Amino acid sequence: MGVRASTLTGRAVVDPRLLHLTKWKERQVDDMLIAHEHDLGGRFALGPRHAAVLLGMTDDEAAPIFELMDTDHNDLVDAFELIATIVTLSGLTIRQKIDVLHALFDFSRTGELTVDELTIFFRCVSSGCSKVDGNVVAPTVAELEKTAKWCFTKADRSLSMELAKREFDEFVFTDPRILHFLEYFSGDTRQVPLLTGAKWTDKGWRLFADAGSPLKGMPFEGESLHSKRPDECLELSPALFGGTRLGLIRPGLVQDRGFLGAVAILSTAPKLIKNLFVPTGQEDPHGRFALRFIIGGGGGGGRARPGPA
């Protein structure tokens, strides 16, 4: 969990079969935990029917999720890996996710974790998330054991002792790798539900307007002003990274010369332009792209804004 998280950018690209689980809130997560404890007796391995009971779904509804998690195709999945994955994907806050996961892997119910419980914690979360997002590479068991031991070392605990909840929290919320991993799966994912082959449209699209420098000679939105994809308004086939000369970029009627000037400079270094794009997993055929903008020139990760193309 988080050992290789520094390679992740933006938000998670979740397999479409689990996309609806990203909308789960406290009630759905609580129902799942209750089903595991009471209806399934806290069992470790789940078959297809058990998974349906856990998720509160019909067998047909749960089947795609089970198939995705059953990577060795033996009709069994790790219950704690499945639960941990769904909690990580869910719409809970990072704080809520940490609390739920800590309680899930506190097998002795002492409120503290042993080094073995912590290692299992990390393994289930990283392994499960690697199955639902191809950008996530699950660390090796040796790497996870090393991370768990480092957590105990930072808390000045021997490996024969247990880690207090506050010590666990301090490690999770200060270790940049783990925190980055959690942020990657926080908030909205990079994807939205779309019908097969459908083109994505931004329902909240608005033309940028600067009150201090109003546009001249431009129509109002909703009259004759509409957003279009490049292939709908250009005679030539558009290409994102087709040219490298500054003169190839021409401003239009919209007063965006400052932005286009920055893009023109970047156009001489295609790799830098590509770094502005955050993968959505829905570029082709849905035409949904996301770009990262740095507000105020800060050194943070920027904010991704999806757009059609």
Image (cartoon, rainbow, N blue to C red):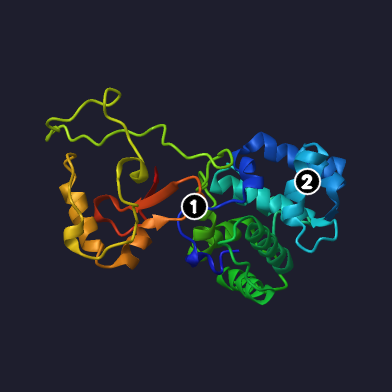
* Residue, disc 1: 11
Q: Position of residue 66 (x, y in %)?
A: 77, 50
**Which numbered tag is attached to residue 262?**
none
Residue shown at the point (49%, 62%) measured from the top left: 8
**Closer to us: 192 or 128:** 192
- Could you say which quadrant of the image residue 155 lies in? bottom right
- SS category of the residue bearing label 1: loop
- Could you say which quadrant of the image residue 33 lies in? top right
Give how far apart the Cα atoms at labels 1 and 2 are.
26 Å
Earlier along the polypeptide chain: callout 1 or callout 2? 1
Residue shown at the point (69%, 73%) measured from the top left: 141
Left or right of residue 251: residue 33: right
* Residue, disc 2: 63
Amino acid found under the numbered disc labelled 1: Arg
Q: Is residue 286 visible?
A: yes
Residue shown at the point (69%, 67%) measured from the top left: 119
Amino acid found under the numbered disc labelled 2: Ala
Q: Residues within 10 Å of mark 1 (few under 14, many from 20)?
A: many
